[in-house]
Image (cartoon, grey):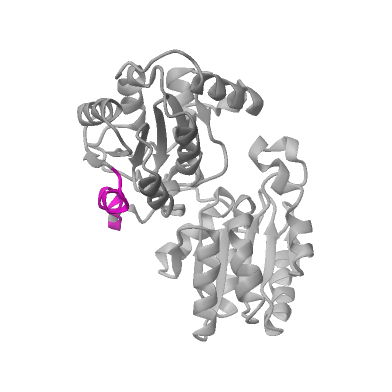
Amino acid sequence: MISNDEFCTALTERGFDFVAGVPCSYFSGPIARLTREGIYLPAANEGAALAAAAGAAVAGHRAAVIAQNSGLGNLINPLTSLTRTYDIPVLVFMSLRGWPDPAQDEPQHAVMGTSTHRILDAVGVPHLTVPATAEAADYRAVLDRAQEELAARRTVFVLTQKGAVEKHTAPAAPGGPADRPSRIDVLRAIEYLLDGTAVVSTTGYTSRELFGVTGSKNHFYMQGSMGHAAAFGLGAALRTPERPVVVLDGDGAAIMHLGTLSSVGAAAPHNLVHVIFDNGSYESTGGQATTSPSTDFAGIAEAAGYASARVCDTVEDVTSALAAALRGDGPHLVVARVAGSGIAAFSRATAAMTTTDIREGFAARLHSKETSRAG
């Protein structure tokens, strides 16, 4: 295993002083240290991370990216039309979820796990692989080979298997203040309001907790597709206007594709309620901080055309705001400021259901005759 110190020291020795990224639990240790050293930029998404690193590289610095292969699609555009087009050398560390055996990971990683190497080959991007058995000497050798590509002004990927890099072992600090309600407390309080609505929950602990609290087989538990819960809910709401659609989002996920709020405001579906649980952290990848403290979700939603936007700090406020939103024409935004949970309290929905079950259960809810309690 490569220790956090070995990972970061090898980068520093080779002159890297700018690292942008989106959290992945495989790299939680290096991200924690690079953040403390002040050289890590938390990017909105993988493509933005590569673009920021490219800017730093053109400014004369050695730049790297840390990302997960599930977000490779977000990164392809600047990879093919920015760094390759302008010959900008960036070192990209990318975790290999769903590889070498997709059956050993969650279902949302199966396709990308078996495709990552082939996608990079298809777009002509050099890549090196760090296996789970790698030691510090192996890692340094890979970096030396990567430097040859960088010297030729090529962006190069270092694909890293699970277990190759030491994880962050210190307890993750809760994102939100401890005096805020927990997300589980809020979900329990609003569960009755969700009866009869079509619920879409974002990837990570939100979906785990929703399933753990409700046990419903009619909610859409979005594993993977980070940042796209609101867009998925928007499409469903526009084509089933008779059914209230509630999107349970996260602050990090909402930031990843913040432009969707503009799409929601422009389309103005009257039956959509967008709830953002804001705890200031990416909990399921190690508790890294999001940029939500400097992001006014309510202000953005109102400026984008939402009918209303309300920020809530208590369970009672969230319950009241959601009930009111379900009674009036939307779209509405409810920002629930919650405490960080630190660890997962429940298993993923796919431990009890297949992804096909989830899809079909949600489709049945969209077209059922049942009405919302708030209605």
Residue closest to the eye, 280 or 234: 234
**Within the magenta stretch, is there residue 345?**
no
Quarter of the picture holding the C terminus = top left
Q: Main secondary structure of the magenta part?
A: helix
Tell me where residue 190 appears, x and y as whole percent.
32, 23
- Against 95, residue 78 (above or below) is below
Tell me where residue 27 appears, x and y as whole percent.
56, 55
Taking the spot 41% from the left edge, 35% from the top edge, the residue there is: 247
Image quadrant in which you'd find residue 76: bottom right
Residue closest to the eye, 123 or 102: 123
- Against 108, residue 262 (above or below) is below
**Within the magenta stretch, is there residue 299?**
yes
Tell me where residue 354 appears, x and y as whole percent.
65, 25
Taking the spot 77% from the left edge, 46% from the top edge, the residue there is: 100
Residue 177 horizontal side relative to residue 59, left or right: left
| Count of marks, rendered view | 0
| Residue that extends furthest to the bottom in the rendered view of this protein | 60
Residue 179 horizontal side relative to residue 221, left or right: left
Image quadrant in which you'd find residue 357: top right
- Part of the protein shown in magenta: 294-306
- Against 212, residue 230 (above or below) is below
Can residue 274 be seen in this snapshot?
yes
Residue closest to the eye, 160 or 314: 314
Can residue 16 be seen in this snapshot?
no
Residue 314 horizontal side relative to residue 272, left or right: left
Residue closest to the eye, 369 or 132: 369
Tell me where residue 159 appears, x and y as whole percent.
69, 59
Quarter of the picture holding the N terminus = bottom right
Taking the spot 68% from the left edge, 51% from the top edge, the residue there is: 96
